[in-house]
Amino acid sequence: MKRIGVLTSGGDAPGMNACIRAIVKAAKANNIETLGVYEGYKGLMEGKMEVLTANYVDDIIELSGTILKSARSAKFKTEEGLKLAVEQAQKHGIEGLVVIGGDGSFRGACDVSKFGLPVIGIPGTIDNDIAGTEYSIGADTAVNIVTDTVSKIHDTARSLIVDMPRVFLIEVMGRGCGYIAVTSAIAGGADYCLVPEIPYDVNEMCTHLKTKFENGKLYSVVIAAEGATGVNELKKQVDTILNIDSRTCVLGHLQRGGAPTAFDRLIASQMAVRAVELLMEGKTNRMVGVIAGKAVDCDIFKGINDKNKISQEIVRLNNILIS
Ligand code: F6P
């Protein structure tokens, strides 16, 4: 194997650059050249790629986002687009492709592999909803950002003496997955958490917050995953039930920026090295993950078809800690 390609696709995640860097270095250690494909599958179709040297990628480890950019392409989903992508890969001598992204990106990789190009997927999404791995690249950074925000809200909230419950509603990312919400609720010491996977009752939540207030906790913080509810809608309900004027905060894309945590850099590097090894072993349609600190791999269809279920242990822990 002389040359491999790497692309990032879908939503970017902090740590993707650390992953690209490690791919280039692992390939170089085996005398393999890495082509960086710009703008995801769109760039692959258009032949937008160049050789990434170890020197060039050496100090991108602390950069967030992706130096290769990401894009959405309707054309790639057509027969014509797919053929174009494969032709470009062949023209540029790509013998194996590493795709960093989520389930949609892995689906694209599978389509490409049908034309004989070996592909390996690396999970990169702050949502941490991809099966086959305990962590996807970016999730830890996002959780740290939310945790830090909760602490900042605590700083201001604890200063004010009030005679009505002061409630802060924080909306975090996670359309179908409450991982960011529940882990940062525990780490940040939130008073309640709403996730899409578990039905909730706003009345019950308000009773809980009111009881805490009556017991002397003048303020409370609620973390809601966007997939559970938007905080503007939640505010209307909470304000009516408690007869207060709660405060809202939508963290949005703040959660996808900032320097990746050491943990995200570490797992990104681990998964990158394993991905290169898999290509060298002649494997295809595999997805790399990290389980119990070790780089592992499984069928890429697991990453496409299954979702990481919210950990019941974490949910139980949160239920104890919010009291
Ligand atoms: O990266 C995953 C995710 O952050 C989701 O949690 C979120 O709903 C979505 O991407 C939003 O991303 P965009 O605005 O780029 O489509």
Image: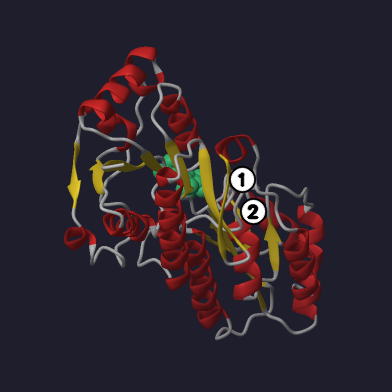
Q: Quadrant of residue 184?
A: bottom right
**Quarter in which the N terminus is drawn:** top left
Residue at 36 percent across and 23 percent down: it is 76
* Three-letter code, disc 1: Gly
Q: Which residue is mark 2?
A: 178
Residue at the spot of label 1? 227
Say which amino acid is labelled 2.
Gly
Question: In the displayed structure, would residue 264 be above or below residue 115?
Answer: below
* Side of 26 relative to 33 (left or right): right
Tell me residue 125's x, y (percent): 48, 50
Q: Is residue 100 among the parts visible in the rendering? A: no
Residue 53: percent from the left, percent from the top?
A: 18, 55
Q: Would residue 200 appear left or right of 295 to someone viewing this image? A: right
Residue farthest along the top direction in this orientation: 80
- Circle 1/circle 2 CB separation < 8 Å: yes
Near mark 1 (Cα within 10 A), the count class, few <14, some 14-19 or many ≥20, is some
Q: How is the image coloured?
A: secondary structure
How crowded pointer 2 is (Cα within 10 Å; few <14, some 14-19, many 20+) is rated as many
Give the answer, above or below, for where 124 lies relative to 142: above
Q: Is mark 1 within 8 Å of ligand 1?
A: yes
Query: Tag 2's secondary structure?
Result: loop
Residue 33 appears left or right of 183 = left
Note whether residue 114 is visible.
yes
Q: How far is disc 1 from disc 2 in space, using C-alphas? A: 8 Å
Secondary structure type for disc 1 = loop
- Residue name at image x 29 percent, y 63 percent: 63
Q: Front-most of 296 and 240?
A: 296
